[in-house]
Image: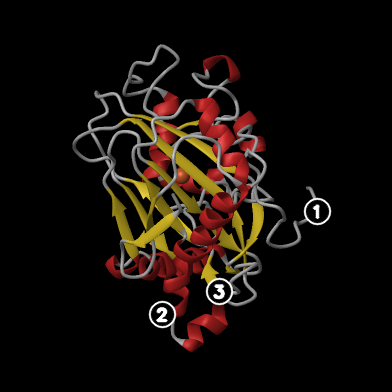
Amino acid sequence: MAVAIRQIHPVFVGEVSGVDRRPLAADEAAAIEAGMDRYAVLVLHDRNITDEQQIAFSRNFGEIENSAGGNVTKPHEKRLNPLMNDVSNLGPDHKPLPRDDRRRLFNLGNQLWHSDSSFRAIPAKYSLLSGRVVVEKGGNTEFADMRAAYDALDDETKQACDGLVCEHSLLYSRGLLGFEVTEEERAMFRPVRQRLVRTHPLTGRKSLYLASHAGTIVGWPMPEARAFLRDLTEHATQPQFVYSHKWRQNDLVMWDNRQVMHRVRRFDESLVRDMRRTTVAGDAPTVEQAEAA
Ligand SMILES: [Fe+2]
């Protein structure tokens, strides 16, 4: 059976069929990668997979990103293999984390629009999220097409954005929620630089590279930078650019962090929501980094 992709939103997002659970053949992986270039988000249903199968599937698209330095969970508190990003609401005992648990409060940052790992000097290429246990109500993942958002800017704003460099850090996104970090975390979350407008290496399409992690623009006064970034984010997340994914158990949703932003919506956190992410590493920084302080 050949890989087939059906577009399910007016500007992006494809639903994939014709992929079974055995390892992908090279032409199937190439068809999915071409689908990612075009649709930026792909949805696969009925993928009842193990962590090992998810890791193997993800490796078709590049190296798995090391998850170290991207959260406040200590190594001994981890529930999953270090190659997996645990984006559930669960502790190592597989029970929902208590309301005031720091790990839970940190993870609430996923409700803000973002691009995974934009706070790393080499930001992520793809994320692949597997819905192992999903909730009935709430918990949708929303995606915004940052290519369509860029295309819809007026020429003056496009010119204002081109060439700008932002600083991204988990300190900025978590700061928006009033989350307090330790000194050790502050050092770990040191800001990195990212281009505000990215060009896709294959399609040549431009996109806005925004995230709640973006806290300032190099060379700009911070309040002016934040007001501008907020304005762009409001533009980029208008309903015509957004797809809301309602999870079914065993859905696997993959997205290109270079071309979309995403966020999770609220849900009843007394319920188990077991979501597991693999992240495919990017291959280069978007811009030269500042000298280490
Ligand atoms: Fe995310």
Q: Residue at x 51, y 33 (%)?
A: 54
Observer-nearest residue: 263 or 254?
Answer: 254
Label 2: which residue? 152
Q: Are marks 3 and 2 in contact (CB under 8 Å)?
A: no
Q: Is residue 227 left or right of residue 45?
A: right
Label 1: which residue? 291
Q: Residue at x 69, y 50 (%)?
A: 121
Q: Position of residue 92 (x, y in %)?
A: 45, 15
Disc 1 from disc 2: Cα separation: 35 Å
Q: Residue at x 65, y 35 (%)?
A: 66
Q: Is residue 246 left or right of residue 254?
A: left
Q: Is residue 293 left or right of residue 27?
A: right
Label 3: which residue? 205
* Label ID, residue 40: none
| Mark 1 neighbour class, 10 Å CA radius: few under 14, some 14 to 19, many 20 or more | few
Q: Amino acid at mark 2?
A: Ala
